Image (spheres, rainbow, N blue to C red):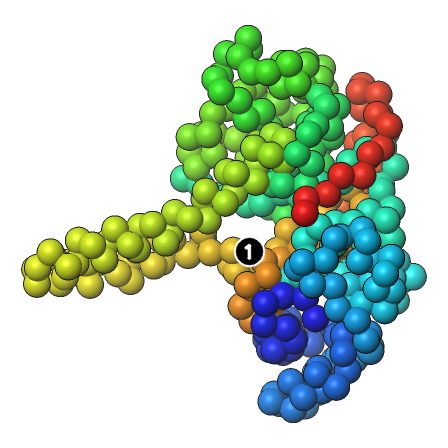
Amino acid sequence: MGGDFAPAREVEGMVQALRAAHNEFEVILVGREEAILEELKKHDMQGLRYSVVNASEVITMDDSPTAALKQKRDSSLGVGMRLHQEGKADAFISAGNTGAVLSASTLILGRVKGVSRPTIGTFFPSEKGVCLLVDAGTNVDCRPQHLYEFGVMGSIYFSKMFKKDRPTVALLNVGEEKTKGNEVVLEARKLFEASTLNFIGNVEGRDILKSTADVVVCDGFVGNIVLKFGESVPTFLRARLKGVAERGLLKKLIVGLAKSTLKAALSDMDPNEHGGVPVLGVNGVSIIGHGSSTSKGIKNMILKAAEVAKTQLNKHIEEALANSPVPPVKPVLQVAR
């Protein structure tokens, strides 16, 4: 029931995902049963593997994340997350309240041993592929050890998703020099240098799209600003092209001819292409999508959840942190609102 267009896009996305995956898994739809069944009537469900679990309450975008989880025990988010925690589902996805999903992931699923703060990362298209930016908005205030853990989790996630051994890891900073940055970043660099990660040093904002590093690490305050700025680029470019087209017939023809090429070039910046992002560092697979996700976005979230569930990501994260030269810090729950 999460998302701006629930449950219509969730149901449609589920149908698309099952057909794309040739029905290789089952999808459990959790929410207000009557509303879900009405949407199911609009689609050909013959032969598709799905089930419906009723949940009478909905956590809205305006609800306080942790308070809503306590007050709305029968929410689709809470019921679905508990199904995953109990082993009745292998993964959980939601396009609902991000803070609530993060809270539920941490409080219900629990943290992977050695993780003090779970995090989320987001993929940016780059000149030679993609770049994973982590943290993308979960933890706005971080200690050096937190940034190091983000680097470990991001490196493992990138490696499993793209089958790349030892992806490069960098710290987002105001300069490439070792002496640049605030106290947290300066101390974090020492931890990265002492680790077994493939750490290449500091990078600047312009390096995210240049493929300088596979994984770029920062705190959630900076990461979320970068993410939101990146999401505005396609809309900005379309507006500029529209302005050029209005300058005359010739300009309009030129822009028209370039339109399909531009659309293809910018498709990687569409959040719906990547579906959603996993909460890294929790004992399970929890995928968060945009509230405005289209049915295509929901489909890709489901397919990503299935893919991540097969990677044993958490096992690899726990092993990496267990062998880490960096001592763990006291866990603190802090989520974006």
Using residue 98 as the reference point, say whether residue 254 is left or right of it: left
Residue name at image x 61 percent, y 88 percent: 43
Residue 55: give x, y in percent of width and height: 82, 74
Using residue 36 as the reference point, say whether residue 178 is left or right of it: left
Q: Which residue is mark 1?
A: 274
Residue that extends furthest to the top in the rendered view of this protein:
179
User: Where, by quadrant of the figure, is residue 69 drawn?
Assistant: bottom right
Residue name at image x 45 percent, y 42 percent: 229
SS at circle 1: helix
Q: Quadrant of the N terminus?
A: bottom right
Residue 172: give x, y in percent of width and height: 55, 26
State whether residue 191 is above or below residue 105: above
Residue 300 in sight: no
User: Where, by quadrant of the figure, is residue 11 drawn?
Assistant: bottom right
In the image, 71 versus 144, the foreground residue is 71
State whether residue 77 is above or below residue 142: below
Residue name at image x 55 percent, y 63 percent: 292
Residue 82: give x, y in percent of width and height: 87, 62
In the image, 166 versus 257, the foreground residue is 257
Amino acid type, mark 1: His
Q: Count up the numbered dots.
A: 1
In the image, 313 versus 141, the foreground residue is 141
10 Å crowding of disc 1: few (<14), some (14-19), many (20+): many
State whether residue 65 is above or below residue 321: below
Residue that extends furthest to the right in the rendered view of this protein:
86
Residue 12: give x, y in percent of width and height: 60, 77
User: Where, by quadrant of the figure, is residue 250 drawn?
Assistant: bottom left
Using residue 261 as the reference point, say whether residue 165 is left or right of it: right
Residue name at image x 58 percent, y 58 percent: 290
